[in-house]
Image (spheres, grey):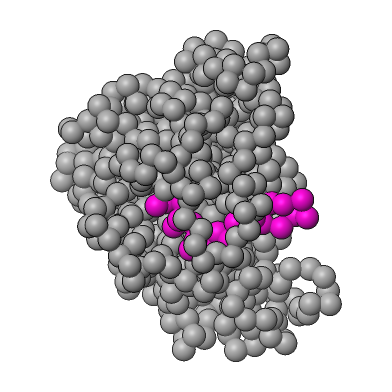
């Protein structure tokens, strides 16, 4: 047992006043006991065992159903270290304003001590954290999402390390006015109070694995990214690993778990990770990535046997569902699932529901938490201690127009610009208005733990340190026609875009690509659309690069990047000017 952890637990307990302290060991007996206690206390509902063995439904407080970005702060000593895209609070203000909210916050509750590892237990690039929480629901989710319990303490003892990330979480009274998620990059510490929602309360996930880890990566020469990792195998026998950065609820999980419609021909996709990638430079000069998580915290609405059959198989058992609807038979239901809503449905708040109410039965950000090992398409390399070598990186988001279905950057520097300037329509994964286009660099806007101008510089440095950096692409499955209909079928058919990406990486099919002002885009013949019943008009629209639209897009990109001032790398300023030159829009430059 680490003496430093014991001292810290005692110190926090003196402030929070829990009725008891339980050290979690991660055993089967422990989770069975915890689940039984939560069912008895009404925190969980045990689902029908014949439909979802060992699975449960949890209902959140209606005011606590998504990440609260406006209440999430970076508490660096200097505001410029947090940058213009983060909310900043000084450590002193945090101590005076937020720490008092923890006073007596666990009275009448149990404090659970949750040691955990982010990453495979044997990987050198894995890191240990300890979360103190008064939520048994958080403990159950952390057990699925991380290597939790004694295994983490054993790693510290085995390595002789006292390097671990402390995180304190209390449900508090769940009041939004007393809700804060704070990150202290200098001390690598996390405080979360007033929320039980996954992204705010599972401190190993966005808080550690992205916000704190991005700072650790900057300081130690690696990267923590909001990225899937997939394995693409071809009929020729080659295997390629591709990472992809997509904002939450923009198809990242669907792509990571894609079931190939051409598997019978030898085109196969397997999942390494579906949300977070930690990336380092390998001895061979390539960028290698590990998935630091051991489970999936996916969006339920829209998930079906059509959109993501592997996810549906993954949630068959050993799953916690959050804020979905409940059928009279004790099964779960959500909008977009395979069956119409049955009569007698209870909505995500436990109220009688019918379609005539005009409200969703499941919350739009309803979730499932399931073990990665449930995934029938899990890569054999998903826990490789060295990680997997990346050949390509995708940046994607929801854009109804302007962005073609796929384009390749001219260089690593141009690829960094492509990621730094990307935008997407907002979704229900975060509180606020849905459907608004906002810049979300590398899909990390809510998750970067330091100034994003410096973050872009770290990307450039990583490429310079890699002898063979991955090729960079931008994708957009969500382009629409004039009537608002999606032009591309998406889901499994996205394999066709992955095949074009592979060809580009390998230097195949040069006639299948053309140079445009924004990058290299497929020709109409270069993208395989056989059997899709896709009109030539729709295909041309998917591949089009409208100079007028892009002149406006480039101007908006420049305005966004200007806010970083002296922290913005000169390489990105040059890439912006080069884009304007290629568009013939030099006059638009400010």
Q: Does residue 33 appear left or right of residue 170 in this picture?
A: left
Q: Is residue 407 visible?
A: no
Q: Is residue 404 above or below residue 347?
A: above
Place of residue 581 in the rendered image (x, y in percent of width and height, measured from the top left): 59, 16
Locate residue 368, reporting x and y percent: 52, 65
Residue 127 on the magenta segment: no
Q: Residue at x 58, y 34 (%)?
A: 422
- What residue sits 69% from the left and 81% below the top? 341
Location of residue 278 by image quarter: top left
Visible residue check, residue 27? yes
Along the line of sight, the residue nearer the viewer: 388 or 114: 388
Q: Is residue 351 left or right of residue 406?
A: right
Q: Which residue does the image show at 27% across and 30% down from the upper left?
A: 468
Is 226 or 266 nearer to us in this picture?
A: 266
- The residue segment tinted magenta is 480-499
Q: Residue at x 70, y 40 (%)?
A: 437
- Figure label count: 0
- Quadrant (top left, top right, bottom left, bottom right) of the C terminus: top right
Is 483 displayed left or right of 281 in the figure? right
Q: Is residue 228 above or below residue 91?
A: below
Q: Is residue 498 magenta?
A: yes
Q: Position of residue 126 (x, y in %)?
A: 28, 43
Q: Could you say where residue 252 lies in the image, as x and y percent from the top left? A: 50, 53
């Amino acid at each position: 047992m680490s003496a430093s952890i014991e001292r810290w637990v005692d110190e926090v307990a003196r402030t929070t006043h829990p009725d008891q302290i339980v050290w979690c060991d991660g055993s089967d007996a422990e989770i069975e006991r915890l689940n039984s206690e939560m069912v008895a206390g009404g925190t969980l509902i045990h689902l029908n065992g014949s439909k979802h063995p060992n699975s449960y439904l949890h209902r959140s407080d209606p005011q606590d159903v998504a990440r609260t970005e406006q209440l999430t702060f970076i508490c660096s000593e200097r505001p410029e270290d947090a940058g213009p895209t983060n909310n900043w609070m000084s450590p002193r203000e945090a101590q005076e304003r937020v720490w008092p909210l923890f006073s007596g916050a666990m009275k009448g509750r149990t404090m659970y001590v949750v040691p955990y590892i982010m990453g495979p237990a044997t990987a050198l690039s894995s890191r240990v954290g300890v979360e103190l929480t008064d939520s048994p629901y958080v403990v159950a989710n952390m057990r699925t999402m991380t290597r939790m319990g004694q295994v983490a303490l054993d790693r510290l003892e085995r390595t002789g390390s006292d390097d671990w990330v402390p995180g304190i979480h209390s449900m508090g009274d769940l009041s939004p006015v007393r809700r804060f998620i704070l990150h202290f990059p200098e001390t690598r510490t996390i405080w979360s109070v007033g929320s039980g929602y996954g992204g705010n309360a599972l401190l190993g996930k966005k808080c550690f694995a992205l916000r704190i880890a991005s700072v650790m990566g900057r300081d130690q020469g690696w990267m923590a990214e909001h990225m899937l990792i997939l394995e693409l195998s071809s009929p020729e026998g080659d295997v390629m690993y591709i990472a992809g950065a997509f904002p939450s609820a923009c198809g990242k999980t669907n792509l990571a778990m894609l079931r190939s419609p051409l598997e019978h021909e030898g085109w196969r996709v397997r999942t390494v990770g579906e949300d977070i990638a930690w990336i380092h430079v390998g001895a061979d000069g390539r960028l290698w990535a590990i998935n630091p998580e051991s489970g999936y915290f996916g969006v339920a609405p829209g998930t079906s046997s059509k959109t993501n059959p592997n996810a549906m198989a993954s949630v068959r058992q050993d799953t916690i569902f959050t804020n979905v609807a409940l059928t009279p038979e004790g099964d779960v239901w959500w909008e977009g699932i395979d069956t119409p809503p049955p009569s007698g449905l209870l909505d995500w708040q436990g109220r009688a529901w019918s379609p005539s109410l005009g409200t969703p039965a499941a919350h739009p950000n309803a979730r499932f938490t399931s073990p990665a090992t449930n995934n029938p398409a899990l890569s054999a390399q998903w826990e490789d201690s060295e990680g997997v070598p990346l050949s390509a990186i995708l940046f994607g988001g929801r854009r109804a127009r302007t962005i073609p279905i796929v384009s390749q950057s001219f260089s690593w520097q141009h690829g960094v610009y492509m990621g730094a300037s990307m935008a997407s329509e907002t979704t229900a994964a975060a509180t606020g208005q849905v459907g608004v286009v906002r810049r979300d660099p590398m899909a990390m806007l809510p998750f970067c733990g330091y100034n994003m101008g410096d973050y872009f510089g770290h990307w450039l440095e990583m490429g310079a340190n890699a002898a063979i950096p991955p090729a960079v692409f931008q994708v957009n499955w969500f382009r629409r026609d004039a009537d608002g209909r999606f032009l591309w079928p998406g889901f499994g058919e996205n394999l066709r875009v992955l095949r074009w990406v592979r060809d580009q990486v390998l230097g195949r099919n040069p006639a299948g690509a053309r140079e445009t002002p924004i990058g290299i885009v497929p020709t109409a013949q270069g993208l395989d659309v056989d059997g899709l019943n896709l009109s030539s008009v729709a295909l041309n629209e998917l591949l089009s690069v409208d100079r007028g639209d892009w002149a406006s897009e480039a101007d908006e990109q420049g305005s966004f990047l200007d806010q970083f001032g002296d922290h913005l790398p000169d390489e990105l300023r040059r890439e912006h000017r080069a884009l304007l030159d290629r568009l013939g829009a030099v006059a638009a430059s400010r």
